[in-house]
Image (cartoon, coloured by chain):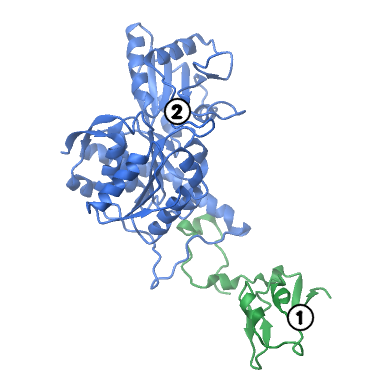
Chain colours: A green, B blue
């Protein structure tokens, strides 16, 4: 990455910590927070999109076949998708497993 | 040259804001600030300024909407008092962190409990560390002048900070005083149009109020501290210009008859004028006494204080708020700390006075000066005049 993630010194802090580069928050990969990851069982998935709607991170997207996948750069592993999935197609598994 | 008027000070403060052609007023009424809120509303309703008045549902909303308006580049005024200020407290440090130069008129009032609507400084003191510039006015003229100065200082590109103007509730807000109200042309000359550093605008993307993680939070706080510390140079510059244009002098600490004084009283706010009379009376009796009046509370004027105390043997600091279980009143503890490294410092004593609207008279200041001179204070701080 050519630009710094954050100002190196206090002198480089913009007044009011204003950020003039749109979308810069996407450079922060919240996926590193994850302890559990959602795994989809597409044989149970009915493609309703409830997981996509409820994901607070907005990191679930529809793939070419109409199933759903999470972007693990941003998925925090909160498990809301698994909790909301009523056909129970999503399981939360420990990262180290 | 301005017009000499007899005007209630609360009304005059709103008139001063109108002379500054504010764009937005977001205010929730509370005693003893209500006349400020009502009059700002009148001014907008009557079309005297091209502005919006936001009728908010609380003080928290008042300052929040003031911030939103300021972020779009508007010149914004708000006003509050006591519990209202405490309710704003969550938003106070965010306003300064976002470097939005809002001006807040504060009608200083005691905080509950017991419930009390009268004047002291217990509302503003907890706001000390929120990163706002704080002016303390002594009379109606200073309220008007400081309101206009506040916009000029806060909006200066070298400052970009919110400013609160403190006026004692009732003692100032509800008094009709003779005030020289500057002309519109004069104010226009002194206060240029506000050109914000950045504004929320769909065509020029900017994020304000962002997350500051551990890697950046400390640097952000340091940059805010440097901004308010350095603002004292701009305040001095603005006050010099004010004096040149309007003929009224402002200093961070104003001395009264301290040239050869050995004893000095110290006040902040409207009690300065009562203390002046006490100094005059004691001088007639041969006592070498003077008075120091703090006009600038934040940034704290360290240099001015160190110069002002030269030759003084006993300094009696008055406080109009308590720091329960602490080292004394908030003004006292700061004064003592500021002078710790000064080799020739006075003995410093603390009187807590005028709580919740308790009257403090000329005789009281005379008595405080006499007692301080005798060095007969048994405690580090004294609740002066408390029965029992």
Q: Position of residue B97 (x, y in %)?
A: 49, 53
Q: Residue at x 30, y 52 (%)?
A: B22
| Relative horizontal placement of residue A81, taking residue B256 as reference (left or right) | right
Q: Position of residue B159 (x, y in %)?
A: 40, 49
Q: Residue at x 44, y 67 (%)?
A: B206
Q: Chain of mark 1?
A: A
Q: Position of residue B82 (x, y in %)?
A: 46, 38
Quadrant of the snapshot with the N terminus of chain A: bottom right
| Relative horizontal placement of residue B79, taking residue B129 as reference (left or right) | left
- Assess whether mark 2 and mark 1 are in contact (beta carbons under 8 angstroms): no
Q: Is residue B330 visible?
A: yes
Q: Is residue B310 visible?
A: no
Q: Chain of mark 2?
A: B
Q: What residue does disc 2 label?
A: B306
Quadrant of the snapshot with the C terminus of chain A: bottom right
Per the image, label 1 sits on a secondary structure element best described as loop
């Amino acid at each position: 990455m050519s630009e710094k993630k954050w100002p190196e010194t206090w002198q480089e802090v913009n007044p009011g910590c204003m950020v003039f580069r749109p979308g810069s928050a996407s450079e922060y990969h919240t996926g590193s927070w994850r302890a559990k990851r959602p795994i989809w069982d597409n044989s149970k998935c009915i493609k309703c999109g409830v997981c996509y709607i409820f994901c607070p991170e907005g990191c679930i997207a529809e793939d070419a076949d109409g199933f759903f996948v999470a972007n693990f750069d941003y998925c925090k592993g909160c498990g809301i998708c698994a909790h909301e999935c009523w056909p129970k197609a999503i399981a939360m598994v420990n990262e180290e497993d | 040259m301005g017009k000499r008027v007899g005007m209630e000070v609360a009304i005059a403060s709103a008139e001063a804001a109108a002379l500054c052609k504010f764009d937005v007023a977001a205010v929730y009424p509370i005693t003893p600030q209500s006349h400020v809120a009502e009059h700002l509303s009148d001014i907008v309703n009557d079309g005297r300024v091209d502005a919006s008045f936001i009728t908010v549902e609380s003080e928290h909303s008042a300052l929040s909407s003031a911030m939103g308006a300021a972020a779009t580049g508007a010149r914004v005024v708000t006003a509050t008092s006591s519990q209202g200020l405490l309710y704003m407290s969550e938003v106070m440090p965010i306003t300064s962190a976002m470097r939005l130069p809002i001006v807040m008129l504060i009608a200083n009032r005691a905080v509950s409990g017991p419930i009390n609507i009268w004047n002291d400084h217990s509302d503003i003191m907890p706001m000390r560390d929120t990163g706002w510039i704080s002016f303390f006015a002594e009379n109606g003229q200073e309220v008007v002048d400081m309101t206009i100065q506040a916009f000029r200082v806060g909006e200066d590109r070298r400052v970009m900070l919110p400013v609160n103007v403190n006026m004692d509730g009732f003692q100032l807000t509800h008094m009709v005083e003779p005030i020289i109200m500057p002309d519109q042309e004069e104010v226009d000359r002194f206060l240029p149009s506000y050109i914000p550093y950045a504004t929320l605008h769909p065509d020029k993307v900017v994020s304000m109020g962002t997350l500051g993680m551990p890697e950046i939070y400390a640097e952000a706080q340091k940059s805010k501290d440097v901004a308010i510390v350095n603002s004292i140079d701009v305040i001095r510059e603005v006050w010099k210009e004010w004096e040149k244009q309007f003929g009224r002098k402002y200093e961070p600490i104003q001395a009264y008859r301290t040239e050869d004084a050995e004893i000095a009283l110290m006040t902040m706010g409207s009690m300065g004028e009562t203390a002046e009379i006490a100094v005059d009376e004691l001088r007639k009796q041969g006592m070498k006494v003077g008075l120091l009046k703090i006009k600038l509370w934040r940034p704290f004027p360290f240099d001015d204080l160190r110069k002002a105390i030269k030759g003084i043997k006993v300094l009696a600091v008055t406080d109009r708020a308590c720091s329960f279980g602490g080292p004394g009143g908030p003004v006292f503890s700061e004064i003592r700390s500021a002078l710790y490294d000064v080799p020739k410092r006075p003995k410093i004593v603390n009187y807590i006075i005028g709580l919740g609207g308790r009257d403090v008279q000329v005789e009281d200041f005379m008595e405080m000066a006499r007692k301080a001179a005798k060095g007969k204070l048994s405690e580090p701080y004294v609740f002066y005049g408390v029965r029992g």
